[in-house]
Amino acid sequence: MDWMAWTLPTAIFFGVIALLLLTFTVLAIRFPETPRTGILRIETTRGDRLFITLLGSAFINLAWLGLVGADQWYALILCLIYAVAVFRWV
Amino acid sequence: MTDIRTDAPGRTHDAIPGAVTASPAATTTEAARPRRAARVNGSAIVMGLYLLFLMLPIYWLLNMSLKTNSEILSTFSLWPQNLTLANYETILTDASWYMGYVNSIIYVTLNTVISITVALPAAYAFSRYSFMGDKHLFFWLLTNRMAPPAVFALPFFQLYSSVGLFDTHIAVALAHTLFNVPLAVWILEGFMRGVPREIDETAYIDGYSFPRFFVRIFMPLIASGIGVAAFFCFMFSWVELLLSRTLTSVEAKPIAATMTRTVSASGLDWGVLAAAGVLTIVPGALVIYFVRNYIAKGFALGRV
Amino acid sequence: MNKTINQKAWFLVLPVLVLVAFSAVIPLMTVVNYSVQDTFGGNQFFWAGLEWFDELLHSERMWDALGRQLAFSAIILAIEVPLGIFVALNMPKKGFWASLCLVLMSLPLLIPWNVVGTIWQIFGRVDIGLLGHTLDKLGISYNYTQDFLAAWATVIVMDVWHWTSLVALLAYAGLQSIPDAYYQAAKIDQASRWKVFRYIELPKMQGVLMIAILLRFMDSFMIYTEPFVVTGGGPGNATTFLSIDLVKMALGQFDLGPAAAFSLMYFLVILLISWVFYTVMTNLDKRDGL
């Protein structure tokens, strides 16, 4: 495991992702997913929207880093807004 | 274009105007005939040119492989003046060359066996059942087929070095499962969805257990699918250079790496290089006839 | 399609899951870990935060490589897709000639990628290659190791040679699925050749063409071996595409941190395109299912 060079922040990062996946699995068991068609005009389920959120967040973070540069935390706030939007309208 | 489709429809629409009225029929057929001949030739010319474009470079490689090195460098000729098999002899007698083929074949075979074995049950699951997260899993597999080997080269190098598998055949075989397992799952799923579910249900009613049903009844039904999947696993592992080169140094060095390294080292032995190239085409060329109708399906991950 | 819901199917998928987790998830996690650290050889790592991402996002090297990559993908798509369709329309439909065409056209697809490079490396050389020699005799100066345009032309022609058949074969498969009745109806309506193509053949090929375009885009987006063998990324950096640049950084210079950051951004783009691909595929399946 040494060669993988774990650090606390990356461990937390993967922990959060794992936790999200777990939460959504539990949610899917409790409240079965029903696909719906949103503004992208494709059918999405809750899991799909999670994926769109995560992928989009990655790009938002990169864009923030490239264009603004300072204070990455604001990018995370932006991601949260984006996430809400995705879950509401996509 | 429609005219050259096949002989049969050509004949039928000749017959249609003839059946309706007599006099226009004569004129249409009269007019159509020369036009059809011209069009057939048009297509033939297009295909001829295209195939010529495809074959010329391959012919040139073959041509070079049959020349001596001095002939290659001294005279420019469209075919070998002194036909020689010396280049092939060099490869087949020199261990540093032919071991490249042996190594490649070993890891490619290992990879094909592993990929197909694990992909069969998974593909069955995807084609027959819906379960939680199935679509996401299927998508995730696809991303691995699409992932650039360059991204994985470095971590693979670290991973296999740390577990002591660097420069072994199994390391390359496992590394290639990255894109071959998803490929096999997708292709097999494509074939399996074509098999009616009633067959499964009948077998279960007849008292077959799942493993017996799968091996005895189901696998023979999708035999061509398994063949195609195996062919594509074999091929994608065979043609891959980056990962196999990164994960090996001496013991398991594949032919592809032998070739590139020879170029950079001596750079001049064109005849042997060409012969080595020709020999790598042989496995694909041998089976190509049998898979000709499935090439598109295989490349399109079973979706055509 | 009516699939039964059966959570036990997970057991059938488990082997694949374990294997792919081993060969995909662990390496990707490692890449993430490396991307935020610096190393000076050995196994000593130092926290670097987002420094590498920051550096790469502002480095001309990566944007240039990305630009070249996109240009390359765009050019080969612009050539291969129309040419592939054109070839497919001219292929014989049945019998010996159809088989012969299929076999010969499949041949380039099955040649190991480094051999494809070798073939064109030899073919394009002025002293020993047919193409280079002919061009030289015609008075065209052509040297793919020195000249920017020649290098690009060689790499593009090579890719067209290698992969156009794939587009053609897929389009051909689409054409084969059109019932003869459609053509006969068109014949009765005296539809022009163009109209037959526009209103019968093209719509029927739409699905397979979508697959072909996406596949060609993905595969050209991660092209490594062929240009590497022919030009080695040169002259200068003229044909250094994303994968070539990444390998240079990762295995040539062993810059783990920047290479990992590069890999991650590369992978994110791939993930996005894969998702588009998958969405298209499932929509096609659904349409065909109806």
Image (cartoon, grey):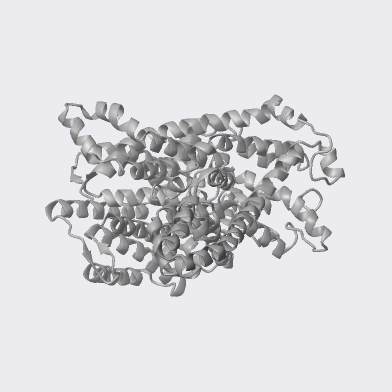
Residue C48 appears in the picture as rendered: no
Q: Which of B183 and B225 is in front in this view?
A: B225
Where is residue C109? Give x, y as percent.
55, 47
The reply, left or right, for residue B127 in relation to residue C172 is: left
The reply, left or right, for residue B119 in relation to residue C50 is: left
Q: Which of B38 and A17 is in front in this view?
A: B38
Is A61 placed above or below B205 here?
below
- Image quadrant in which you'd find residue C182: bottom left
Where is residue C4? Give x, y as percent.
18, 45
Residue lying at the far right of the rendered structure? B74
Residue lying at the far left of the rendered structure? A30
Residue A30 appears in the picture as rendered: yes
At x 25%, y 37%, the residue is C11
Q: Nearer the viewer, residue B220 or B2?
A: B2
The reply, left or right, for residue B182 in relation to residue A83 is: right
At x 38%, y 71%, the residue is A71
The reply, left or right, for residue C236 in relation to residue C66 is: right
Is B293 placed above or below B227 here?
below
- Image quadrant in which you'd find residue C236: bottom right
Where is residue C253? Give x, y as percent.
60, 51
At x 76%, y 51%, the residue is C130
Q: Nearer the viewer, residue B254 or B22?
A: B22
Q: How many marks?
A: 0
At x 17%, y 27%, the residue is B206
Residue lying at the far bottom of the rendered structure? A68
Where is residue C143? Give x, y as percent.
76, 58
